[in-house]
């Protein structure tokens, strides 16, 4: 859209502290086409942002993963997905460990995924995407890295140890010893071992060996083969049916520090002072703190350092005839890092505080006088543009940010030919934060004691600030900082800036937090590639047709298409629907037919048709997942070289008295119906249904309790009935309540397992959300140990700034620190907050 000249005065107020350009009233026509380009580019790049709040990021086998998905920027007319797909990906080999689909409405989805013990421990990622496609790919995606551990001692364990590294002869071999032992500490001979040296995509060395009678094998790795970026030594150990994956990141003999310079505005300019951002990482991509000396023509002129996040800055007045180099203290004498090329002329932007509240102050200077255009925008919308005349005298400009949106925005300086010659990003309205008060009635609790939690939004000046949040209370050590995500820093920083240094809190209020964010904005301040892409945008690029992933299939006879329609019976839980195929046998499933509250399979059957007939589904979600996996790269977990690695690190501590799950063997079944039941454990019938000692059907907290029993036809049981109406987004409750959760009674129908044949097919459905319920020890105080790390989870709570929301739950038998994490949205912002308390024995 065109931005008229009189609108500039309404949008932004410019104060020129030193001089006012005599042609500040210039017409908009000079920049109108550029404004249109930015407008088109904004439409082309406009998108919603998917964020998913997980209860934690460290899980054990046979545990539930709870999550709430928020689609920020949801638009009912343009982007209204009805399904959210959650794919658990093994980071090691990018294979799909499990996949489920969930109902999504009004930009929200809630779900839980059960991690069976068939999934081995290791590093994994949840890859989530919505059902709306743009150019054949999901419009909205989100990745949450997690760690899966085990609570029980595995049948075998393996270790790798680097031997005599200090005595190694230069140019010789590195000795790596593998040890494989059983649960009783006895060595395992003849275990099969497949190994490689390199990285996941390129193997420098590989092979297969077997352990000796002591359960050992010593590898000899040529020292000259180990280098930065290809220093993973990985071994897969197989014994009987169990496979152990173990990795050792080898130290690199020459581990040079990677140093990158980022002149503020984009370039160093002759005889003009510039602030230079500095980023330092080791060869493994881990941020490191360094200290060095800046040399000008081999003479020291400054001492420079980066902080523990690997970022820093310094000032310099570069001269074209001089040579500038950085030498790091402790590095080899011949290791020097040259500053970027110095330009003879050009403008320089300087911002002292790029983390701004309501006003941004910037200095502009050009050694050679010239006419430039100053634009404030966010690559989606132009907020103002005006010409400025620059010379060697610094011109200070104060930009009032009243109508500039909160978050990252950009200042671009253009020359007289509208070419970008300097650019800087800044964060507007940093002080405008939607915050939430989280209060507990005590700082310390005993095990199995009631916790009273109060939530209240802080008033932002509106009549009543309203928000919708998800609430988790988890054991603090179940969150690995390197894999943590919070909605605030993700929406405002991580979604827009790639590869920023690892930090626990990006948007904190401490002096260190603010200094780190200033440096991040400095080193990410020049995005020339975006400008080039923007200039190539036309109005035709704004048309981006979207499609929905559909559930389609076909019926064939002797592997050929039909010539007349057939009727298909669809069974979902206890409901039966009928649908008719096209003449060719093709059909599309109505999503409402395959929505399920039990996480069980949906059965498709041809009545009376068996021999020669076959039902097939196209697995469109599986195809989309595979497309994403082809481009998927696991997030850097910031591993550092170590001398020893042991698979016992996969065992989570603190579960010494946990119940060991018995092995369930299912024989003779010809149907896949039970594959989709997440709770096939103690007391299950053929359908995977069971009743816990509290008379709750398919109780999520007691799936492993030996007191569980199969349900009986005609008997009454409780089911959790606290749900969220996906149309009104309001909670509904029924009947009997335990603590903060509500239950209703149902009469159990018989369990029917359909024998499979080619004319019957079981598929996974679209899951409705389940409500987490915690223990209420005032009603039932079991003598069984309750090692529950997620003691509370609520998919959606409605809070405001007028009254407090009270939530109650109980601690479990786990002691130590616990953390309450609250994440969600208001009408105009996002919310993040946390509170920690301690649990001890009575």
Image (tube, rainbow, N blue to C red):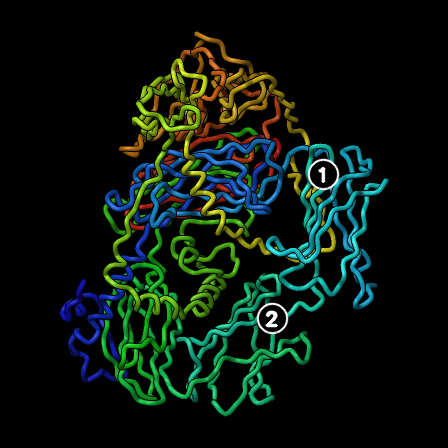
**Secondary structure type for disc 1:** strand
The residue positioned 77% from the left and 51% from the top of the image is 161
Relative vertical location of residue 661 with respect to residue 181 in this rendering, above or below = above
Look at mark 2 in the image and give the residue it sits on.
Answer: 290
Q: Tell me which corner region of the image, top left, top right, bottom left or bottom right, holds residue 188.
A: top right
Q: Quadrant of residue 824?
A: top left
State the residue lying farthest toward the bottom.
321
What residue is pinned by disc 1? 238
Is 482 on the left or on the right of 396, as rendered? right
Q: Is residue 648 above or below residue 353?
A: above
Q: Nearer the viewer, residue 655 or 674?
A: 674
Q: Residue 441 appears at what percent x and percent y?
A: 46, 37
How many numbered tags mark residues here? Answer: 2
- Where does the N terminus fall, quadrant-wise? bottom left
**Picture coordinates of residue 115, whole percent (x, y):** 55, 33
* Mark closer to the chain start, 2 or 1: 1
Label 1: how many residues lie within 10 Å, few (<14), some (14-19) or many (20+)?
Answer: some
* Residue 159 image point, x, y percent: 74, 46
Q: CA distance from mark 2 to mark 1?
A: 43 Å
Q: Can you see residue 594? A: yes
Q: Is residue 161 above or below residue 130?
A: below
Residue at image position (79%, 67%) is: 171
* Percent x, y of residue 364: 33, 80
- The residue most toward the right is 213
Residue drawn at point x = 32 percent, y = 52 percent: 47
Give me the disc on residue 424.
Answer: none
In the picture, measured across the screen, residue 516 lies left or right of residue 577, that is: right
């Amino acid at each position: 859209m065109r931005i008229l000249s009189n609108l500039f005065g309404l949008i932004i107020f410019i104060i020129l502290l030193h001089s006012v350009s005599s042609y500040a009233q210039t017409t908009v026509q000079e920049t109108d086409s550029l404004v249109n380009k930015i407008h088109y580019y904004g439409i082309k790049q406009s998108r919603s942002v998917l964020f998913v709040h997980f209860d934690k990021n460290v899980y054990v086998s046979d545990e539930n993963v709870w999550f709430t998905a928020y689609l920020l920027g949801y638009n009912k007319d343009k982007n209204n997905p009805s399904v959210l797909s959650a794919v658990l990906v093994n980071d090691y080999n990018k294979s799909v460990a499990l996949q489920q689909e969930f109902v999504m409405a009004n930009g929200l989805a809630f779900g839980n995924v059960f991690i069976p013990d068939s999934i081995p421990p290791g590093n994994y990622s949840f890859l989530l995407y919505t059902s709306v496609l743009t150019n054949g790919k999901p419009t909205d995606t989100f990745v949450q890295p997690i760690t899966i551990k085990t609570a029980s001692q595995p049948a075998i364990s393996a270790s790798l140890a680097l031997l005599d590294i200090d005595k190694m002869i230069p140019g010789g071999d590195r000795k790596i010893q593998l040890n494989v032992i059983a649960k009783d500490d006895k060595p395992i001979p003849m275990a099969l071992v497949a190994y490689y040296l390199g990285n996941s995509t390129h193997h420098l060395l590989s092979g297969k060996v077997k352990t000796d009678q002591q359960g050992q094998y010593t590898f000899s790795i040529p020292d000259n083969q180990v280098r930065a970026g290809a220093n993973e030594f990985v071994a897969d150990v197989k014994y009987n049916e169990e496979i152990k994956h173990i990795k050792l990141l080898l130290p690199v003999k020459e581990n040079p520090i990677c140093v990158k310079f980022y002149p503020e505005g984009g370039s160093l300019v002759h005889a003009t002072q510039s602030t230079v951002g500095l980023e330092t990482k080791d060869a493994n991509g881990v941020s490191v703190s360094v200290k060095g000396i800046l040399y000008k023509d081999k003479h020291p002129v400054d001492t420079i350092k980066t902080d523990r996040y690997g970022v820093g800055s310094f000032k310099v007045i570069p001269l074209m005839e001089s040579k500038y180099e950085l030498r790091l203290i402790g590095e080899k004498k011949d290791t020097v890092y040259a500053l970027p090329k110095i330009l003879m002329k050009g403008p320089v932007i300087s911002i002292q505080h790029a983390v701004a509240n309501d006003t941004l102050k910037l200095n502009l200077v050009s050694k050679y006088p010239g006419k430039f255009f100053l634009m404030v925008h966010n690559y989606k919308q132009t907020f103002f543009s005006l010409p400025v005349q620059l010379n060697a005298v610094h011109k200070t400009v104060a930009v009032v940010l009243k109508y500039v949106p909160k978050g990252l925005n950009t200042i671009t300086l253009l020359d007289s030919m509208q070419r970008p010659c300097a650019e800087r990003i800044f964060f507007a309205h940093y002080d405008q934060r939607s915050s939430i008060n989280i209060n507990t009635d005590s700082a310390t609790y005993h095990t199995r004691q009631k916790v009273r939690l109060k939530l209240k939004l802080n008033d932002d000046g509106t009549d009543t600030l309203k928000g919708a949040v998800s609430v988790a209370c988890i054991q603090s050590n179940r969150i690995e900082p390197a894999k943590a995500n919070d909605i605030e820093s993700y929406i405002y920083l991580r979604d827009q800036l790639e590869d920023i240094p690892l930090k626990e809190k990006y948007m904190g209020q401490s002096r260190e937090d603010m200094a780190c964010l200033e440096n991040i904005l400095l080193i990410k301040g020049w995005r020339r590639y975006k400008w080039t892409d923007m200039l190539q945008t036309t109005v035709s690029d704004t048309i981006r047709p979207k499609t929905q992933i559909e559930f389609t299939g076909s019926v064939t006879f002797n592997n050929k298409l039909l010539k007349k329609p057939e009727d298909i019976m669809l069974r979902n839980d206890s409901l039966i629907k009928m649908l008719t195929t096209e003449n060719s046998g093709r059909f599309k499933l109505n999503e409402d037919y395959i929505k399920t509250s039990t996480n069980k399979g949906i059965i498709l059957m041809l009545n009376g048709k068996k021999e020669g007939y076959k039902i097939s589904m196209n697995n469109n979600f599986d195809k989309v997942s595979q497309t994403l996996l082809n481009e998927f790269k696991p997030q850097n977990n910031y591993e550092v070289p170590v001398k020893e690695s042991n698979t016992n690190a996969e065992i989570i501590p603190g579960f010494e008295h946990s119940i060991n799950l018995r092995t369930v063997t299912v024989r003779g079944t010809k149907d896949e119906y039970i594959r989709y039941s997440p709770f096939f454990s103690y007391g299950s019938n053929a359908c995977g249904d069971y009743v816990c000692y509290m008379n709750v059907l398919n109780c999520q907290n007691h799936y492993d309790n030996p007191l569980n029993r199969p349900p009986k036809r005609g008997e009454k049981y409780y089911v959790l009935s606290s749900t969220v109406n996906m149309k009104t987004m309001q909670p509904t409750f029924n009947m009997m309540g335990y603590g903060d959760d509500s239950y209703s009674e149902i009469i159990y129908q018989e369990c029917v397992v359909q024998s499979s044949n080619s004319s019957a097919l079981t598929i996974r459905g679209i899951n409705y959300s389940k409500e987490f319920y915690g223990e209420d020890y005032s009603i039932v105080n079991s003598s069984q140990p309750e090692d529950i790390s997620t003691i509370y989870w609520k998919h959606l709570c409605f809070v405001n700034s007028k009254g407090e929301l009270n939530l109650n739950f109980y601690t479990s038998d786990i002691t130590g620190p616990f953390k309450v994490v609250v994440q969600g949205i208001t009408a105009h912002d996002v919310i993040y907050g946390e509170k920690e308390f301690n649990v001890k024995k009575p």
